[in-house]
Image: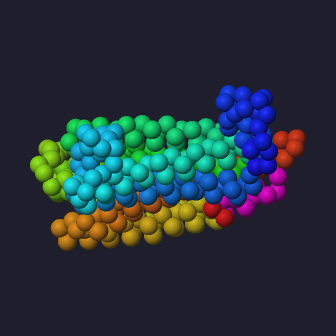
Amino acid sequence: MEGVSNLTRADAVSVVRNPLAFVAARWTPHPRTVQRAALAALVMAVVIVVTGGAVRLTGSGLGCPTWPKCTEDSLTTTNEMGLHGVIEFGNRLLTYVLCAAVGWAIVAARSQKPWRRGLTRLGWAQFWVVMGNAVLGGIVVLVGLNPYTVAGHFLLSSALIALATVMWQRAREGDAAPRPLVGKPVRQLVGVLVLASALLIVVGTVVTGAGPHAGDSREVPRIPVDWQTVARLHAVLAWVVVTLTFALWFFLKAVDAPRGPLARTRELFLILLAQGALGYAQTFLNLPELLVGLHMLGSCVMWIWVLLVLLSLRERPVEEAGGLPGPSAEPTLAKT
């Protein structure tokens, strides 16, 4: 970004008034840079969920007993707090890494030529979800790991993953009007699949809130339901999602659908089978921490692929001058 270091007075005023516009005027990232920035934000959204799960599964949820400081007198963890303090504080530090990844995605999207406002807004939406979830994470600590706030913390993280997934996909597409690749019945079936998957995640947070992994070695309130009963409901919903996915794959095959939707659906089906195996294994083995953590990772991956299936049902070609779709847009979904 040549010239940024040699600022005139007018440049300095421009930086203060609108730093993003200042950078965008002097830097044009390659489209792959924008895509990588969006992917980095998505990866970090998953990492923050998995490390947050590690905090809970190691009993480190109150390793830093207050917020925003780690203790009343220290911003960071202390030697007296031991490993639990290190784990909890480390997870807090990763929030800054997540913010940096989202910030990079925003800057890259804003600097792309021509400026894609929709893509930039997706980046800003992620930023505000991260800020809201950081505050909610602090509330979780201040209320002693209340299970309802913990569930809300995870659901906001799932919303962040959804936004990051959409931005990643949109970064690999154009801004032309979406063109459906399948008929209305298929789109309706996928809509039901998305809703069932979202419900599966919500019920999963109830299993977590009622189950034995409270997040701290001390007495922590749990959601007052039998977690094993809710776990069985969770399993039933999982089988509903698997069945819907298989039905979708079978129907797409029957109508000779494009390669993109078929490939995403096949991948989702395999992910669901692996996630189901993990779910049953952790139940039969009395919820070992490692398997529970892998199941949380699987939940994130499943949610990403459900959304990719939804997004693969249409294409958005890259527009050339004059508003006509360019030829480079055609293989977009086939390479998703």
Of residues 229 and 145, the one nearer the viewer is 145
Residue farthest to the left, as pictured = 219
Q: Residue at x 20, y 71 (%)?
A: 285
Whether residue 251 is in magenta: the answer is no
Q: Residue at x 58, y 45 (%)?
A: 103
Q: Tell me the colour scheme of the image.
A: rainbow
Percent position (x, y) of residue 127? 52, 40
Q: Quadrant of residue 82 in the image?
A: bottom left
Query: In the rendered image, which quarter contains the C terminus?
Result: bottom right
Q: Residue at x 18, y 44 (%)?
A: 223
Percent position (x, y) of residue 102? 55, 47
Residue 20 visible? The answer is yes
304 in relation to 199, above or below: below
Of residues 141 and 276, the one nearer the viewer is 141
Left or right, residue 1 beside residue 73: right
Whether residue 333 is in magenta: the answer is yes
| Residue range (magenta) | 326-334
Residue 225 visible? The answer is no
Q: Quadrant of residue 22 in the image?
A: top right
Percent position (x, y) of residue 204? 30, 52
How many labels sit on residues? 0
Percent position (x, y) of residue 315? 68, 52
Left or right, residue 296 beside residue 167: left
Of residues 192 and 300, the one nearer the viewer is 300
Left or right, residue 87 beside residue 113: left
